[in-house]
Image (tube, rainbow, N blue to C red):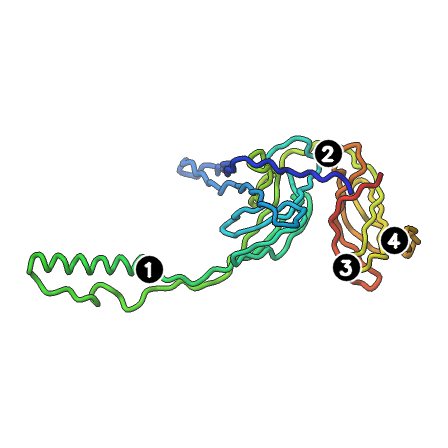
Amino acid sequence: MGVLTLFLALTSCKKETKISTNAASTDNTSKLKTNTLPAPTYVDLALVARKPGENFDTYHATFHGSSIYLIGPLVYDQAKYPNLVNGVPGFGQSMYGDNYATVDYQNTGPDGNVFGGTQGTMSVTDLSAYHKDLESYFKAVDTQALSGNGPIPLIYDYVKQSYPTSSGGILFFTGKVIRVTTGTHIAFADINYPLPAATPYTIPSTFINVPDPNNSSIHYFLQGDKGTISNGHIAYLNGTVYTNGPAIAVSGSYTQVTVGAGDFHSIGTIIRQDNTTFRFDQVDNTN
């Protein structure tokens, strides 16, 4: 396995907001109209204390009202993004939610881990309106008792028989994982958070070995060329010896984790001979 880039610095977390505006052209009355779009933001992830027996790091943040966890370590393309700037795409191992939040899908691509999920909401009664009406009733009772004037207030003239209740439901959220200059240097960002400028470089060709998650004796030998994975074949493992098998269908991409080193981050989909598929997302060292 190659070197995984992991950021564990525990510093104070803060949230960055950038302002994005689009100014429309003037209309016939020569009045300038300005449309202000919501600025893409990010939320710093905090490092969670390891539980007994854990050998990995877990990060957490509340993102769009949902409690989301990221399992590290975080990997990113050092050759493409050699400097620490906001927005560098990051790739974690897995994600999950709690407190009625779930991460329904997680994909990897040029924007890093892009994810979507759902947040369950409970029905809530408008208790503030109820308390306000009760307060009005008690004040009317006190006023009448002190003055002795007017009819005695009746509670049903102030307090309603029922109050509206918002129905429970499901809220949907999307986001992506990025590197940032604040906090632990890992964050959840709005899906439209801009990618920083990348440093151009030539990705060398490489050989990629992907084990089948359902059968440890079957591996897939893939060929990567200029960042693309488009062909490969089955390799049957007998002890420490590989025997080449038939070609398989594969699509994917890869990046070099560290310039000049043999570690590559590859992602893609393999179609087995029985037409079942599985996705792979790994860092492999070809040296």
Query: In whole angstroms, how far apart are the C-alphas of marks 3 and 1?
Result: 52 Å
Q: Nearer the viewer, mark 4 or mark 1?
A: 1
User: Which image quarter: residue 29?
Assistant: top left
Query: Is any part of residue 20 visible from this angle?
Result: no
**First in residue order: circle 2 vs circle 1:** 2
Question: Total label count?
Answer: 4
The local secondary structure at tag 4 comes to: strand
Q: Residues within 10 Å of mark 3 (few under 14, many from 20)?
A: few
**Which amino acid type is marked by label 3?**
Thr
Please identify the quadrant where the C terminus is shown: top right
Query: In whole angstroms, how far apart are the C-alphas of marks 2 and 1?
Result: 56 Å
**First in residue order: circle 2 vs circle 3:** 2
* In the rendered image, the vertical position of residue 269 relative to residue 39, given as above or below: below
Q: Which residue is mark 3?
A: 277
Q: Are marks 2 and 3 in contact (CB under 8 Å)?
A: no
How far from the left and from the top, in percent, is residue 58?
A: 61, 46
**First in residue order: circle 4 vs circle 1:** 1
Q: Which residue is mark 1?
A: 127
**Which amino acid type is marked by label 2?**
Ala
How far from the left and from the top, in percent, is residue 99?
A: 52, 57
